[in-house]
Amino acid sequence: METSRTTGHPEVRSFPIAGLASPANIITFSRIMASPVLFWLILDAEVSHGTSWAAFVLGWIFGVSDLFDGRIARATGGVTRSGAFLDPLADKIVVIGCAVSLVSVGRIHWLPVAIIILREAWISIIRVGYARQGLSVPARPLAKWKAFIQGIALVLAVMPTLEDQQWVVNGAIWIAVAITVVTGWQYVRDGSAVAS
C-alpha cells in the first residue's frame, strides 16, 4: 500500500468500478448482507436468551472475515474509497444489530448498548463534519481493535455454554463499552488537534 507524502498515512485509492468489486469489498458487502441472518438466529433463540451454536459460529465467521478483508485489500492493490466506507459500516451494522437483538431477548442490559450506539452516532457526526472541512483524523491502533473486541463480547453472549454465566457476558460487554468510550474520546481529542 502506498503512503501519502503529506500525511504519512496509507493512501486510499479510488477505483470507480474495480474498487467496489474488489475481493475485500465483496467480503465486506457479504457480511452486511448476511447480518440479518445472525440477528434472526439470536431472536429465534429467545428461550435460551439468544444463545445458539449457529449464532456463535456465524459470529466467528464474521469476525474472521473482518480481520482478513483488510489484509486482502492490501494484498490486491490497496484500500479503496468504497472499502474505507464499507468496512466500518459493516462493523456498525453487525455490532449494533447483534447488541439490539440481545437486548430484545433479555441477554444483555440496554444501558451498555445505548452507550455504544450513542458513541458511534456521535463520532460519525463529528467525522462527517471533519470531512466537510477537508480534514482527516487517522484512527489510533486501539480504535482499529474496537470492533473486534465488541465482536468478541457479543460472540461470548451467544455462546450456549455461557448461558448461565451472566457475569462473564456482562464483564465482556462493559470492557467493550469502556474501549468504545476511550477510543471515542481519543478521536475527539485528536480531531481537535488537527482542526486547531
Image (spheres, rainbow, N blue to C red):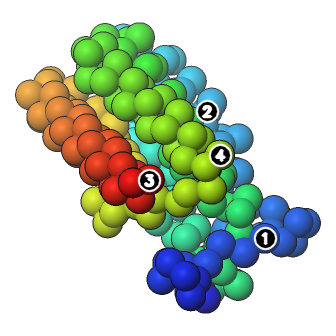
Residues at circles 4 and 3 in contact by the CB criterion of under 8 Å: no
In 3D space, how far apart are the residues under numbered discs 1 and 4 (Cα atoms)? 18 Å
Q: Is residue 25 visible?
A: no
Q: Position of residue 171 (x, y in %)?
A: 12, 34
Disc 1 and disc 4 in contact, CB within 8 angstroms: no
Q: Which residue is mark 1?
A: 14
Callout 2: few (<14), some (14-19), or many (20+) C-alpha neighbours within 10 Å?
A: few
Left or right position of 85 against 92:
right
Q: Earlier in the sequence, mark 3 or mark 2?
A: 2
- Depicted 145 relative to depicted 19: above or below: above
Q: Please, what is the three-letter code of the amino acid marked with disc 4?
A: Arg
Q: How many marks?
A: 4
In this figure, which residue is indicated by the disc labeled 2?
37
- Residue labelled with disc 4: 132
Residue 1's place in the image compared with 133, above or below, is below
Secondary structure beneath dot 2 equals: helix
Asked if the residue at tag 2 contacts the one at tag 1, i.e. Cβ–Cβ closer than 8 Å, the answer is no
Q: Which structural element holds mark 3?
A: helix
Residue 159: x and y, percent?
A: 30, 37
Q: What whole-number distance in Å separates the C-alpha atoms at marks 3 and 1?
A: 25 Å
- 196 versus 177 height, above or below: below
The residue lying furthest to the front in this view is: 196
